[in-house]
Image (cartoon, grey):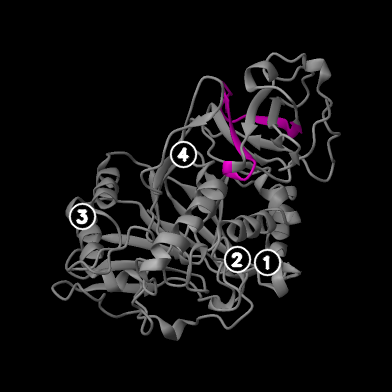
Amino acid sequence: MKINLPTVGPIVGFTGQDHTRLFIRGELERDTQGFRRCFGVVRWRKPGTKKWSAPLFNKLSPNFDMTGVFALQGLTASTVYEYQAGWFFADADLENIEKIDEGLLMWPEQDADFPMTFKTSTAATTGSRNYIVGSCRYLLRLFGGIWYDDRGDKVFRSVLKQIDNNRPVDALLMIGDQIYADDLNFVGPDTRLDQFLERYRTVFSQTYIQHLMARVPTYMILDDHEIEDNWPANADKQDRVTLYPHAVHAYQIYQSSHSPLFTADSQGRIEGTLSHFWYTFVDGCSKWFVMDSRTERDLQSTPRRMVSDTQLNALLDWLDVKDDLVKFVVTSVPLFPDLLNDADDKWGAFSDQRRQIIEHIRNNKIKKVVFVSGDVHCSFVSKLTLDTDPDFLVHSIISSSFFWPYPHMSANEFAFDANLSGTTDRNYVTHLLSGVYSDDNFARFESSLKGVDVSFFERKGDLLGKTTKIKF
């Protein structure tokens, strides 16, 4: 039985000390009886050992664009594994497939230029962890999809070179606008499910991003361009009942499915139904709260809300946990600084909830909080201080864009060294700690209990400016 390579993936997703998630896509094919039954299969082992694990099987459904996620369990912390993954057609049900003689499976040969390996997380909090963080990867699709711009894929080639040069990456954080479903905001925007799915297949199967996600645990959260520009500010009633469900279904398939949001059963299959898109995970010395700052917005409430009360309370409770870990909070649009213009889409326009978060951190004397954002097509590090409370300190790292072929933002478009809007009773002020880099770039974090070193690299891999050292 021949096993074919995935048509999209593999993507290594949520990875802990004893488990990981693997996402793959098979192929959709019809015969005289309808859709052919397609199954995904994976196996893994420690490099240098001969014996593979027993294969895991999963039926790949047309309802989920022929994709599936496998939970590899019972692994060892801080350990490298190699794996194989693929798909095949069979005229059988899943129970019979699981009883198949393993000797009948004909696995594809491993490609030396496309290693399929991953490393589990660590139980230790004393060492450092390394992350690649970025957002806003534009891929222009024109002429009915005949022409694509692949320049945005080359940034991931630079990350792969760093890994191959012994600069490890423990996780990849993609923090918004992984796709631009609304080309140029008006030229051929995606509106139907099949269009969104086709765009994801194209974006995630380009060479370098495919190779990177097959090796490094990858975590994602959406922003507006997974739906439409500045969602939901320009949405009408019809958009909410047609455009939004299609966009979100495709998002769940390609971005949420391999996240910590889903649980796994004893057979390594993912189960559960989503009630929200925000999630948390822990990785060594660092813990992450990945906010959904897009789909829960309420623009009609007074005051306006960026997130639901449920998500806001979950964030505050998460911040309250007494530990010494670095607390990274991902919000696709920056919490601070304020923008001088076009600020309605940012946290400054939702100042009541922003003030709640900031005041909670100050009142409870919570340390080591770093907000991580994208969206604004430039990158920099800043800090927020309060003149009446010298113990209060919060940092912000903005990393954008992976690739944006149009004008980028610059330092003079932000309110540095000025009071944060919506906090007139207190003098919260944002201070710039790094250069403002208006080049396509990605960020590398080296996180430890003592601080975070932040470096920005332009698309071809050269360091932009100097490494910024956040000290705790």
Q: CA distance from mark 3 to mark 4?
A: 26 Å
Q: Is the residue 129 above or below the residue 381 in the image?
A: above
Residue at which label 3 appears: 360
**Among the two numbered marks 2 and 1 on one chain, the one whose residue lies closer to the N terminus:** 2
Left or right of 378? Residue 205 is right
Judge from the rendering whether residue 261 lies leftward or rightward of residue 321; answer left or right: right
Q: Element type at marker 4? A: loop
Inspect the image, locate mark 1, and give the three-letter code of the amino acid beneath it: Gly
Q: State yes or no: discs 2 and 4 in contact (Cβ < 8 Å).
A: no
Q: Which residue is mark 2?
A: 137
Are the residues flagged by discs 2 and 1 in contact, CB closer than 8 Å?
Answer: yes
In-front residue for pair 58/294: 58
Return the residue at label 4: 260
Instruction: For mark 2, give the secondary structure.
Output: loop
Q: Cβ–Cβ below 8 Å for labels 1 and 3?
A: no
Q: Amino acid at mark 3?
A: His
Measuring 54% from the left and 52% from the top, which residue is drawn there? 250
Local crowd at mark 1 within 10 Å, few (<14), some, or many (≥20)? many
- Kindly identify the amino acid type of the residue bearing the numbered disc 4: Pro
Label 2 to label 1: alpha-carbon separation: 6 Å
Q: Which residues are magenta?
A: 63-88
Alpha-carbon distance for marks 4 and 1? 27 Å
Residue 437 to residue 158: above or below: below
Q: Position of residue 360 (x, y in %)?
A: 20, 55
